[in-house]
Image: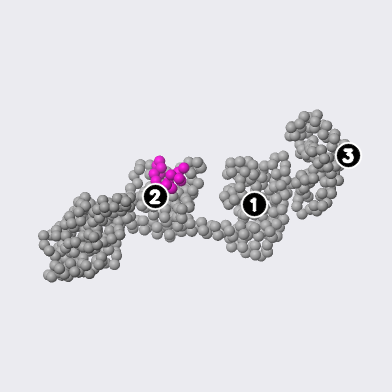
């Protein structure tokens, strides 16, 4: 909270409440006991005086009011008062008498600091600097015929604070009149100075409470749970943390929705923009919301549930402090997560390329992954999604939701998981269709890899399964390598030259015919086999008439010299079309 600060002139800085003796009484000085009732009345009078000081914009009048009230807070006498004007200190003649010249010299010697002052026949004397946010506004010189009690010290210190605040406001008002160009800054200064007039004791209690909150967060590791628990205990309002997408991370207090509503991406973005435009917490419906940010990046959302609009200034400041603390912790946690993610991706890349087994086991253990179990290589490709970090995170999140612990990396057009569990049928695919909002994806899964040495082979198997899925009639879904059957022999690593020779032997004449006549005989034959030899389905898939299909099939028999009714010819022709399409990419 912006406020002018007056250094405690009596000690090295204890809590002001600690100036009061324990047990409800006030510590007496020599022969001068003070009752609790007297102290309360004096404190109440000071509170009333603060309003009078605030309403006064004349520095001399402010000092006059303060000097006139000095005797009401203890066995004091106001010896002198000074206010700053034009770089110098001007005496205020409010008490009807001139102060000794030695007091004037002493005040100027102090050069803005507090310090003792010697006045004849007054054993105790001190000059208090009346300071604002940026400068000294004056001095108040007080003496006493004996050492003040602790209660008198507290009351005098409070009077000094109020006087300094009022002088700061007067200075701000005068400067506002003189410097119109600085109007906005002066208003902010005035607002900040007004805040310091909150009760001194209440302010101290609040600061201790905030300190307790931050200590609790630090002691418990600083996560979302610690923040919401401490914030709820401090303010009494239910506290919650969401990630930047609107998913609940932590809730402390009553009235938690069950189930928690799924976020609406459009409304979430609108909310983030609305809150980001403001400097502090923003009220949206029944929530008081503040963004958790670090260097401009939104890490999450911290909010209090305040349906009755009862949150006060202390609540707002507590929310701001909690957001600052949480931002530091989340930024630290993110840095650690990014380091771990980088290590996991490096290990995944090395495993796919082939790496030393002993080193792989040691590295996996260091990042908490059990590489001794059988693993499956899962390759994910989505035609309508750019393969960036965001998509990789989406795949990792969907896999984790299916109970798959994995190492994740990405390539230019697909994401790769080195997973310790075989995906359940269509479960991963269906989860990703929900996450991405589209069905245009394919997944290839390898056979089990029992050691790190088998992972490069598993990667090739997963790519082959993905390719088969992409080239099939149903191009979207999940394909497992160990369910490919005949297509397993068509995988990478086979003799490419032999495969080309096989294709040329069985459908080479058709390929040459298509090239010369711009025809589609090979594609027609491939589609015929894909449709299981069904005329109607094949004709429909090619968008041609049934009689046209019959003509083309007869021409295929004539050109290739092979009989589709012969079992051996039919099998070899089907394999040849598959090799041509999947392995050779349909090239002539």
Q: Give the quarter of the figure containing the C terminus.
A: top right
For label 2, the residue is: 279
Q: What stretch is highlighted in magenta?
A: 270-287
Q: Give the quarter of the figure containing the N terminus.
A: bottom left
Q: Do the residues labelled 2 and 3 touch (CB within 8 Å)?
A: no
Residue 537 x/y as whole percent: 75, 33
Q: Assign a secondary structure to mark 3.
A: loop
Residue 503 counted in the magenta span: no
> Does any portion of residue 537 appear in the rendered image?
no
Left or right position of 243 against 313: right
Q: Is residue 449 above or below residue 441?
A: below
**Colour mode?**
one colour
User: What is the CA distance from the residue labelled 2 to the residue labelled 1?
Assistant: 41 Å
Q: In this view, does 196 lie above or below 19?
A: above
Q: Do the residues labelled 3 and 1 touch (CB within 8 Å)?
A: no
User: What is the CA distance from the residue labelled 3 to the residue labelled 1?
Assistant: 43 Å
Q: Residue at x 40, y 58 (%)?
A: 214
For label 3, the residue is: 561
Residue 469 x/y as whole percent: 70, 44
Q: Which quarter of the picture shows residue 213? A: bottom left
Residue 283 counted in the magenta span: yes
Q: Are marks 2 and 1 in contact (CB under 8 Å)?
A: no
Residue 389 x/y as whole percent: 58, 52
Crowding near the residue tagged with mark 1, few <14, some 14–19, many ≥20 C-alpha atoms within 10 Å:
few
Q: Assign a secondary structure to mark 1.
A: loop
Q: Assign a secondary structure to mark 2.
A: loop
Left or right position of 431 against 1: right
> In the image shown, does 310 or 271 lie closer to the viewer?
271
For label 1, the residue is: 412
């Amino acid at each position: 909270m912006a406020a002018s600060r007056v250094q405690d002139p009596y000690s090295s800085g204890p809590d002001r409440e600690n100036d009061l003796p324990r047990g409800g009484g006030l510590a007496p000085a020599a022969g001068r006991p003070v009752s609790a009732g007297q102290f309360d009345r004096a404190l109440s009078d000071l509170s009333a005086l603060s309003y009078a000081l605030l309403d006064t914009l004349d520095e001399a009048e402010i000092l006059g009011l303060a000097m006139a009230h000095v005797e009401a807070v203890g066995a004091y006498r106001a010896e002198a008062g000074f206010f700053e004007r034009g770089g110098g200190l001007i005496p205020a003649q409010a008490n009807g008498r001139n102060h000794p010249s030695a007091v004037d010299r002493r005040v100027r010697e102090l050069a803005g600091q507090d310090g003792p002052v010697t006045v004849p026949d007054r054993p105790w004397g001190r000059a208090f600097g009346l300071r604002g946010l940026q400068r000294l506004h004056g001095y108040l010189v007080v003496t006493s015929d004996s050492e003040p009690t602790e209660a008198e010290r507290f009351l005098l210190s409070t009077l000094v604070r109020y006087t300094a605040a009022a002088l700061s406001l007067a200075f701000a008002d005068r400067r506002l009149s003189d410097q119109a160009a600085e109007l906005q800054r002066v208003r902010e200064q005035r607002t900040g100075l007004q805040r310091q007039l909150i009760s001194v004791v209440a302010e101290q209690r609040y600061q201790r409470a905030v300190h307790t909150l931050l200590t609790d967060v630090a002691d418990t590791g600083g996560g979302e749970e610690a923040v919401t628990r401490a914030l709820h205990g401090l303010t009494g309002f239910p506290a919650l943390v969401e990630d930047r997408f609107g998913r609940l991370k932590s809730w402390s207090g009553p009235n938690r929705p069950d189930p928690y509503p799924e976020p609406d991406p459009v409304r979430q973005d609108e909310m983030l923009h609305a809150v980001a435009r403001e400097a502090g917490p923003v009220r949206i419906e029944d929530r008081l919301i503040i963004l958790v940010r670090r260097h401009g990046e939104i890490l999450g959302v911290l909010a209090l549930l305040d349906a009755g609009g009862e949150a006060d200034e202390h609540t707002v400041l507590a929310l701001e402090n909690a957001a600052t603390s949480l931002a530091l912790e989340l930024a630290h946690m993110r840095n650690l997560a990014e380091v771990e993610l980088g290590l996991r991706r490096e290990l995944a890349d090395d495993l796919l390329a082939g790496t030393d087994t002993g080193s792989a086991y040691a590295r996996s253990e260091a990042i908490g992954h059990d590489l001794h179990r059988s693993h499956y290589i899962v390759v994910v490709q989505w035609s309508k999604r750019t393969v960036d970090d965001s998509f990789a995170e989406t795949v990792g999140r969907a896999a984790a939701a299916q109970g798959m612990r994995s190492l994740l990396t990405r390539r230019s057009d697909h994401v790769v998981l080195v997973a310790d569990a075989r995906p359940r049928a269509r479960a991963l695919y269906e989860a990703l269709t929900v996450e991405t909002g589209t069905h245009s994806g394919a997944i290839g899964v390898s056979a089990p890899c029992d050691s790190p040495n088998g992972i490069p082979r598993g990667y090739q198997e997963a790519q082959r399964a993905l390719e088969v899925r992409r080239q099939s009639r149903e191009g979207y879904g999940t394909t497992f390598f160990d369910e490919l059957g005949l297509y397993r022999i068509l995988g990478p690593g086979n003799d490419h030259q032999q495969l080309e020779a096989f294709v040329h032997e069985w459908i080479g004449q058709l390929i040459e015919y298509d090239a010369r006549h711009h025809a589609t005989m090979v594609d027609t034959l491939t589609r015929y086999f894909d449709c299981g030899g069904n005329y109607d389905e094949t004709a429909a898939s090619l968008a041609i008439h049934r009689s046209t299909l019959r003509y083309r099939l007869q021409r295929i028999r004539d050109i290739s010299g092979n009989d589709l009714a012969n079992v051996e010819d039919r099998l070899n022709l089907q394999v040849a079309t598959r090799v041509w399409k999947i392995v050779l990419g349909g090239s002539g």
